Image (cartoon, rainbow, N blue to C red):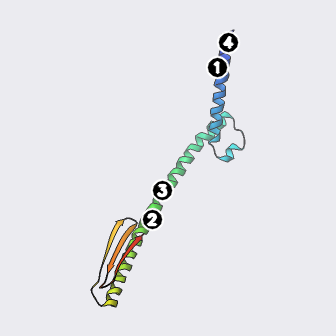
Amino acid sequence: MAKKLNHNASERDRRKRMNSLYSSLRLLLPPEDQTRKLSIPATVSRVVKYIPELQREVERLTEKKEKLMMSKKICRQENYTSVVGLMKKQQRNISKATQSSSASTITRISDREIIVHSSAERAITLHFLRL
């Protein structure tokens, strides 16, 4: 008799754990699938369909991220090129205005930072720019 009671208690605990796991699985589904209580086979079936949907979404978002990163890189390069062009133009203007020797150097510190050092006869200017 004790053996049967022990077996029944073990089986009841196993069913509780399984139901708890199915409930956890159901909570991972999108909200529209959580509004109604799905049967266990329906839950498993929906999860089997939902996983490939998520995989496709991850692939789509990964591609979108790569495109945005590439676009950001191109934008940085364009910004750097325009800043360098602007500084060279300023250097020419300083040179014309002072009619004396002047020098300007542009040092790239990182992808996003440059230092522009301009010097004329009496003026020394240091620009720190973030791209």
- At label 2, counting other C-alpha atoms closer than 10 Å, the crowd grade (few under 14, some 14-19, many 20 or more) is few
Label annotation for residue 10:
1
Residues under numbered marks 2 and 4 in contact, where contact means CB atoms less than 8 Å apart: no
Q: Residue at x 69, y 38 (%)?
A: 38
Q: Earlier in the sequence, mark 2 or mark 1?
A: 1
* Image position, residue 54 (x, y; %): 56, 47
Residue that label 4 marks: 4
Which quarter of the figure is the N terminus placed in?
Answer: top right
Q: CA distance from mark 4 to mark 1?
A: 10 Å
Q: Of helix, strand and loop, which one carries label 3?
A: helix
Which of marks 1 and 3 precedes in the sequence? 1
Placement of 119 over or under 70, stated as above or below: below
Callout 4 secondary element: helix
Residue 43 lies in quadrant: top right
**Badge 4 amino acid:** Lys
Residues 99 and 47: in front is 99
Report which residue position mark 2 lands on: 72
Mark 1 neighbour class, 10 Å CA radius: few under 14, some 14 to 19, many 20 or more: few
Q: Amino acid at mark 1?
A: Ser
Quarter of the figure with the C terminus: bottom left
Question: Which is closer to the viewer, label 3 or label 1?
Answer: 1
